[in-house]
Image (cartoon, rainbow, N blue to C red):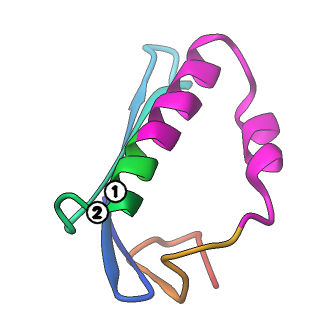
């Protein structure tokens, strides 16, 4: 899925176990070599490991609620994420 947040293009891929539960998250963006891109890769790895060790999605989401930082702005391209 492609999203745009504050003018930044972000690509999100979520892989699932056969039972439909998410098991892996990939995040990427169009800015090659940026520090934010590398941070996003690390964040995706951390979330993927949490999922693979059985941490529920709502617990992961709650842990990262309220964080702010770039990119910021309206989310375009996702039906359920609203700004």
Q: Horizontal placement of 50 versus 43: left or right?
A: right
For the residues labelled 1 and 2, say whether their Cβ atoms are less than 8 Å apart.
yes
Q: Could you give the CA–CA distance between mark 1 and mark 2, rounded to whole angstroms?
A: 5 Å
Residue 40 position (above or below residue 3)? above
Q: Quadrant of residue 30?
A: bottom left
Residue 34, disc: 2
Q: Residue at x 35, y 88 (%)?
A: 7
- Please check the rendered image and state whether residue 48 is part of the magenta-colored stretch, yes or no: yes
Residue 37, disc: 1
Q: Horizontal placement of 39 versus 29: left or right?
A: right
Q: Position of residue 56 (x, y in %)?
A: 75, 27
Secondary structure at numbered mark 2: loop
Residue 11 position (above or below residue 50)? below
Q: Quadrant of residue 69?
A: bottom right
Residue 82, disc: none
User: Who is closer to the viewer here, 4 or 66?
Assistant: 66
Number of the front mark, 1 or 2:
2
The span picked out in magenta is: 42-67
Residue 11 position (above or below residue 81)? above
| Quadrant into which the C terminus falls | bottom right
User: Who is closer to the viewer here, 59 or 8?
Assistant: 8
Asked if residue 7 can be seen in this view, the reply is: yes
Q: Residue at x 48, y 77 (%)?
A: 71
| Quadrant into which the N terminus falls | bottom left
Asked if residue 12 can be seen in this view, the reply is: no
């Amino acid at each position: 899925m492609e999203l745009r947040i504050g003018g930044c293009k972000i690509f999100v891929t979520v892989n699932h176990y056969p039972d439909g539960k998410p098991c892996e998250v990939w995040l990427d963006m169009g800015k090659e070599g940026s520090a934010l891109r590398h941070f996003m890769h690390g964040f995706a790895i951390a979330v993927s490991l949490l999922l693979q060790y059985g941490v529920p999605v709502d617990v992961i989401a709650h842990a990262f609620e309220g964080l702010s930082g770039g990119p910021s702005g309206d989310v375009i391209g996702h039906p359920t994420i609203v700004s």
